[in-house]
Image (spheres, rainbow, N blue to C red):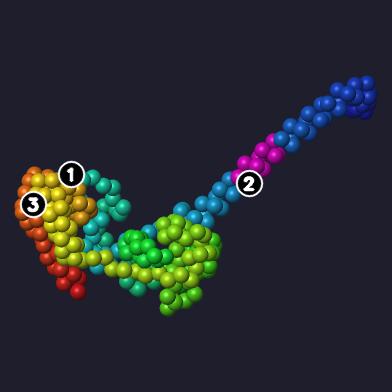
Amino acid sequence: MSFLDILHLALRNLRQAKLRAILTTMGVIVGVAVIVTMMSFGLGLQSNMLARFKALDLFNEIQVFGRGLSNLAGLDRGRQRDEGERGGRRRGDKTPTRILDDAGIKEIAGIKGVAYVEPSVNFGSYVRANGKLLTQTVGGANIPNASTRFQSFAAGKMISSPTAEEAVVSERFVRDFGYAKPADAVGQPLELLAPPSVAEVRDIMTTHLCNLHDFYGDLAGVRVARKHIGWYAKDRPGAAAFWATVVKLDTAAEQLALVRDYFDDLAQKSEQRISYAA
């Protein structure tokens, strides 16, 4: 049987079973269309997710730590923990040996594939805005800045120049300070206040404890004052050992003496560190 005979036979069978031929053709078309649609949807979803992750700078940003003033003066409190307290490390196990000065930043910027280098400057501060005073984390940024986190704003715009007295705030800042919407915070005054020194905290605390002792009496006043002492000493060096002694005292005089000695020691060490740094 020749090829023409086979072709003629196939065409005759199709004419005799038109419905079956149409249904078979439609099934093939629908199946191929479904496969193409699912593949296109999966590839599009993958591309969209990768674009979103790249926009967040999660996988293309590296943080480099250098030997700075905090290492030299012993002020790196993030790596110091009280005995018995456990905490994860944010840095590597090796202590940095090189200072990240302008020359170091320039050298990093010259590495192949590096888009930009931005020094990371972050510190805690008391912030006053919209009639409220709260503690906030303040960070510095290069102006102009190539980071994607400064490319879109709910209201306002990026800091206009390196010398401008302006700031970029987060949506959480807007909520915490009582603004109805982000646009309400644009152009409003914002103050950065220095935290009280250890000596100032000591003076405020001793006055507070004396008032508690006078109001509640020696026995009840000592017990009520314990929780306030815990708040004042929270996250300070040696707080765990200090608290273990506080709970054993039952007289107002002993409690005041212990608090004064503890904060006097902290104030003295703080002054020594500042003098070393200077």
Q: Are marks 1 and 2 in contact (CB under 8 Å)?
A: no
The quadrant holding residue 257 is: bottom left
From mark 2 to mark 3, how far is it between C-alphas?
Answer: 70 Å
* Image location (x, y in percent) of residue 155: 54, 64
Q: Is residue 34 left or right of residue 217?
A: right
Q: What secondary structure is found at the residue carrying circle 3?
A: helix
Q: Which residues are magenta?
A: 35-45
Q: Residue at x 11, y 62 (%)?
A: 264
Confirm whether residue 270 shows in the render.
no
Which residue is more in the foreground, 264 or 268?
264
Q: Which residue is mark 3?
A: 252
Q: Is residue 242 above or below residue 74?
A: above
Q: Which residue is mark 1?
A: 84
Q: What secondary structure is found at the residue carrying circle 1?
A: loop
Image mark count: 3
Q: Which residue is mark 2?
A: 44
